[in-house]
Image (spheres, rainbow, N blue to C red):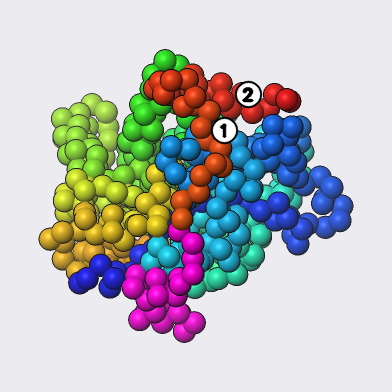
Amino acid sequence: MKMDDMILVSVDDHVVEPPDMFANHLTQEYKSKAPQVTRLPSGCDVWEFNGQKLPNIGLNAVVGRVPEEYGVEPTSYEQMRKGCYDVHARVQDMNANGVLGSINFPSFPGFVGQLWNSCEDRKLARVMLQAYNDWHIDEWAGSYPDRFIPLALPAIWDPKTMAEEVRRVAKKGCRAVNFTENPEKLGLPSIHSEHWRPFWEACVDEGMTILIHIGSGGGMVFNSMEAPVEVMISTTPISIVNLAADLLFSTILREYPTLKFALSEGGIGWVPYFLERADYVYRHHHAWTHQDFGDKLPSDVFREHIYNCFIDDKAGVQMRDLVGVETIMWECDYPHSDTTWPRSPEVLWESLAGVSDNDINMMTHENAMRAFEWGFSDRRPKERCTVGALRAEAEGVDLTLMSGMGGTQAHDEGNRIVTAGDIVNQLANAFVER
């Protein structure tokens, strides 16, 4: 296989929601209550809803900027590459990157719709949640069904409502729904609670894969405000190991044999040691802890239920047989700061030296297509889905890096190392009227 022959489906990208997203999905009664985009005196655009201001944080939309201008200070739409929020421009950027398909996580509502969870008016929360899901499924993903895999937000505040929404969006063809890596940090019962049973059952019934994104529990976590920000950026993906252990040693995976989860943006290099450790712990301790995996080991159950997702992970690719190559899915992370756009094929290809065509196909698109019941179409036959074919359609897409778009505040003081405290202060200052 040559690099241009790969077919790439990214299971982790993000959308910066456009200001008019609710226009076609609410009755007149609720349009005035919907989130609205306003511009602060500082020049950044924020979503306002129910007394809250929610910015588009810079690192969430720095794709196409020169790296020296990365930063977290909130931005205006004019400071972003158009593909962040315009679906037609996004498809052109996907073509330029040789990417066939994409799953897009939300931005301003939070990964699991924390915004709606904070709304005391539960009827209003449900209306807004459903409007969001309808926009995402029908308008964003629906504009190019041969390019996007739809993803639904959960009604995280109530498991019965969650189950009803899972069944509703399933009828619209959606086979992916978000969940949190730590519900307790959102003030909700733990993942081990019977509380979530209606949600698990609905996902099983509808063949829904549950995606859990890093940072979907408590957001950014800093050990110290004096720590360089790289500490948080480096360790956040690996921290999803805590959720992996929670899922594996709970009874969920054994009680629901067909339930599937995907650990979004968690990487894969840590998985072999985690599975080795889980098996060791089970063998040494199950006699007194009363864990019972029957005739299987924890690693067997993990591979049956859990998809593992990576952006750039050479070590993980080399150990793919220990991870379980049938569980691995690739990610681009457009438009976040970790994205490999527009050189995703080149970056990935470096990790694939010596990998068989069969394994490449599984990791780059076949596993994702199976997980989300999504595939090639008459509109986009397989021969038009390769990196080379898509890039041939991208003539005229401007890949020039943008500069002068903000993002330099953290570097203004003698190029000193940026700390966690700097990040917190920048976000706080964004809302100071000046």
**Above or below — where is 111 with respect to 371?**
above
Q: Residues within 10 Å of mark 2 (few under 14, many from 20)?
A: some
> Residue at 67% across / 37% down in the picture?
44
On the image, the x and y values in percent for residue 259 come to 40, 54
Q: Are marks 2 and 1 in contact (CB under 8 Å)?
A: yes
Towards the viewer: 383 or 190: 383
| Three-letter code, disc 2 | Asn
Question: In this rendering, would 39 be left or right of 31?
Answer: left
Question: In this rendering, would 26 be left or right of 268?
Answer: right
Which residue lies under the disc numbered 1?
Answer: 73
Residue lying at the far right of the rendered structure = 29
Mark 2 vs mark 1, CA separation in Å: 9 Å
Which residue lies under the disc numbered 2?
Answer: 429
Q: Residues within 10 Å of mark 1 (few under 14, many from 20)?
A: many
| Three-letter code, disc 1 | Glu
On the image, the x and y values in percent for residue 283 come to 16, 35
- Residue 296 in sight: no
Residue 392 in magenta stretch:
yes
- Mark 2 and mark 1 lie on one chain; the one further toward the N terminus is 1
In the image, which residues are magenta? 376-399
State which quarter of the image contains the N terminus. bottom left
- Residue 278 in sight: yes
